[in-house]
Amino acid sequence: MPKTITEQATQTGRRIEHDSFATVDREAGPHGYDAHQWTIVRRMIHASADFDFNGLTRFHPQAVSAGVAAVLAGSPVVADVEMIRVGLSQARLAHFGIQIHQFISDPDIIARAQADAGTRAVQSMRKAHEHGLLNGGMVAVGNAPTALLEVVRLVRTEGVRPALVIGMPVGFVSAAESKAALSKLTEVPWILTDGRKGGSALVVAAIHALLALAEERQSQSVGPVQPPGSRT
């Protein structure tokens, strides 16, 4: 059934996006992803025009099913930076009842990081845990490796259990290492990009792909949904 919530709002926009996806499919070459994983990787390539993500992107075996289930349950998203919150479609999130949180610029987080001689990213993930947002929530890290390392620590030492961790920090200091640490977790599902490449735009693309997969699942269960503001 056609998607009505997670597609572009105009016919021209939908055509451009679909043509872009077709170009990615044509030029990407062979890959080892299943159809649902490829939906996510293709959108990441579409967002970055970087075919290296065909191969750099890795999935925990339960990542996609866990992510779709979390979306359908309206689980919160905890982001490391404001860029992810701004990049995500608020209308698409609202359709599933999802709220997104990020704390990195909160005054108390800045004060904590200064007192601890650490990073705001670490303190923001600790605050998310204190607020009960990590257990059962989706963690989205596209910028700060220390945020991802803190999530890994919380999983290992404090028993935190996010529904899904999307770990794609970009950079030269600890970015690759944080994702390598995430890849060793067996307790929680994850999606990551190997090495230095990543970024908030990739995380946004991955979440939008999960939203689209969730809408497909939803439409199979209850039939087509009406876009916000429409009338039957």
Image (cartoon, rainbow, N blue to C red):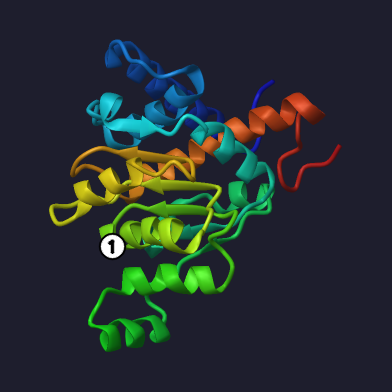
Looking at the rendered image, the quarter that the N terminus falls into is top right
- In the rendering, at what x and y percent does residue 159 appear? 51, 59
Q: Is residue 143 visible?
A: yes
Residue displayed at 50% across by 69% down: 128
- Residue toward you, 32 or 217: 32
What's the residue at 57%, 73% (across, down)? Answer: 131
Residue at the extreme right: 232
In the shown orientation, is residue 11 left or right of residue 5? left
Residue 72 position, x and y percent, is 68, 42
What residue would you read off at disc 1? 146
Q: Nearer the viewer, residue 47 or 179?
A: 179
Q: Residue at x 76, y 35 (%)?
A: 225
Q: Provide residue 15's location: percent of width, then percent of height.
A: 48, 23
Q: Is residue 168 above or below residue 101?
A: above
Q: Is residue 78 left or right of residue 182?
A: right
As rendered, which of 100 and 92 lies closer to the eye? 100
Q: Is residue 201 above or below residue 147?
A: above
**What residue appears at the point 45 percent right and 67 percent down from the top-left corner?**
102
Residue 210 is situated, as x and y percent measured from the top left of the image, at: 53, 37
Circle 1 residues within 10 Å: few <14, some 14–19, many ≥20: many
Position of 228 with respect to 165 (left or right) is right
- Closer to us: 136 or 120: 136
- The amino acid pointed to by label 1 is Thr
